[in-house]
Image (spheres, helix red, strand yellow):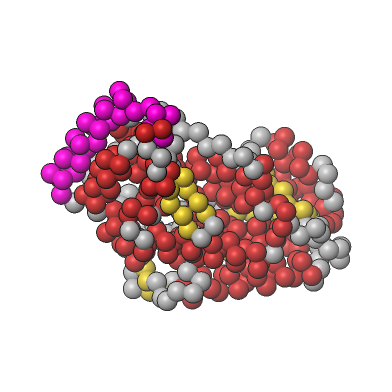
Amino acid sequence: MSADKMTDSWEKLDRLGADVSEKLNLRQAFADDPKRFDRFNVSLDDLFVDYSKNLITDDVMVALRELATAANIEGWRDRMFAGDRINVTENRAVLHTALRNLDGGPIEVDGADVMPAIKDVLSRLKAFAARVHSGAWKGHTGKKITDVVNIGIGGSDLGPVMVNEALRPYHIDRIRCHFVSNVDGAHIVDTLKHLDAQTTLFIIASKTFTTDETLTNAYSARDWLIKALGDENAVAKHFVAVSTALDKVAAFGIDTDNAFGFWDWVGGRYSLWSAIGLPIILAVGYDKFEELLRGAQAMDTHFKTVPLDANIPVTLALIGVWYRNVLGASSQAILPYDQHLSRLPAYLQQADMESNGKSVTRDG
């Protein structure tokens, strides 16, 4: 990264920001330039992004891309895909993209290919979901599962909740999914009061199996189940875990064969693509989950290969920089018009703020 080029880029953007704030009127901009819409849009397959209604000009977009180049965005992107430890705070790789690398080659972290482990977890998730859907997995009293309760918080809740709501038209009729995240006891009590313990399966989503909010709700669910069925051994037939802490999982009463792991290089806000996506698989089936992975893989390929001026993630990110860092906007509205996308703003709020809501630069 060239410090001089970065400084020049910011100074140029500041000048453009002052000019745009004073002079740009969008209604007039469209009247003066009938081709504004044609220039300011990008697409991938049937995904279309119109950014022509933003407070931008051609000069602004050129300057933003110059800033991206000066910041070596393409270099950092390539390092991310290569498994380099670009998370300098925790000294970790940032490799959620590997979870969607269904048709790609090996991806290494510290010299080890992570793809065999990813494919193994996906295979286990597929097999488990098939048992639940077919009725081969039965509860303690021999009844089939009808309800699944995911207990998690943050990325272990927001992503799966968002996707399950978005894909509601594709839900498998026989399985109903519920989500509990609030440590306030009312959340789990209100959820459980309508369920039959004999046909309910719980997913405890906590990588370390130490998350206070999640475990508080998990033990409440465990107590409810044991009280209803009268046998502590019932836990193993009604609880599974998404965790790597197998000793703690076993101590809770869960069979470790029914624990599905993920890795330190998967940030919580991106974890729905990992085993954290188990409630998605149970709701819509593994084939639909794989379609979801392939859609994400298509965007990963687009991000990795398409030039900056036609790159959807880069374009949206640069417009965000323009509004926040240059024009001084203090808030951003995400307004889904499809009711099934009603949980998208909450998911994006976490994804955006955990990624960008920093008060310290990479250099300290």
Taken as a whole, is the magenta stretch helix, strand or loop?
Answer: helix
Does the image show residue 259?
Answer: no
> In the figure, residue 248 lies in which quadrant?
bottom right
Residue 348 locus on image (x, y percent): 51, 43
* Residue found farthest to the left: 4
Tell me what residue is drawn at x 54 percent, y 48 percent.
155
Side (left or right) of 112 relative to 140: left
From the viewer's side, name the closer residue of 228 and 101. Answer: 101
Tell me what residue is drawn at x 37 percent, y 68 percent.
109
- Quadrant where the C terminus sits is top left
> In the figure, residue 76 lies in which quadrant?
bottom left
Q: Relative to 206, does residue 326 appear above or below in the rendering?
A: above
Q: Relative to 218, does residue 46 appear above or below in the rendering?
A: below
Residue 274 locus on image (x, y percent): 54, 61
Residue 189 locus on image (x, y percent): 76, 39
Does 215 lie within the magenta span? no
* Residue found farthest to the top: 22
From the viewer's side, name the closer residue of 27 and 85. Answer: 27
Does the image show residue 159?
Answer: yes
Tell me what residue is drawn at x 63 percent, y 60 percent.
278
Side (left or right) of 348 relative to 173: left
Tell me what residue is drawn at x 39 percent, y 43 percent.
35
**How many numbered circles does the render carry?**
0
User: The magenta stretch spans which residues?
Assistant: 2-30
Side (left or right) of 65 relative to 340: left
From the viewer's side, name the closer residue of 364 and 176. Answer: 176
Does 23 lie within the magenta span? yes
> In the figure, residue 64 lies in which quadrant?
top left
Residue 21 locus on image (x, y percent): 32, 26
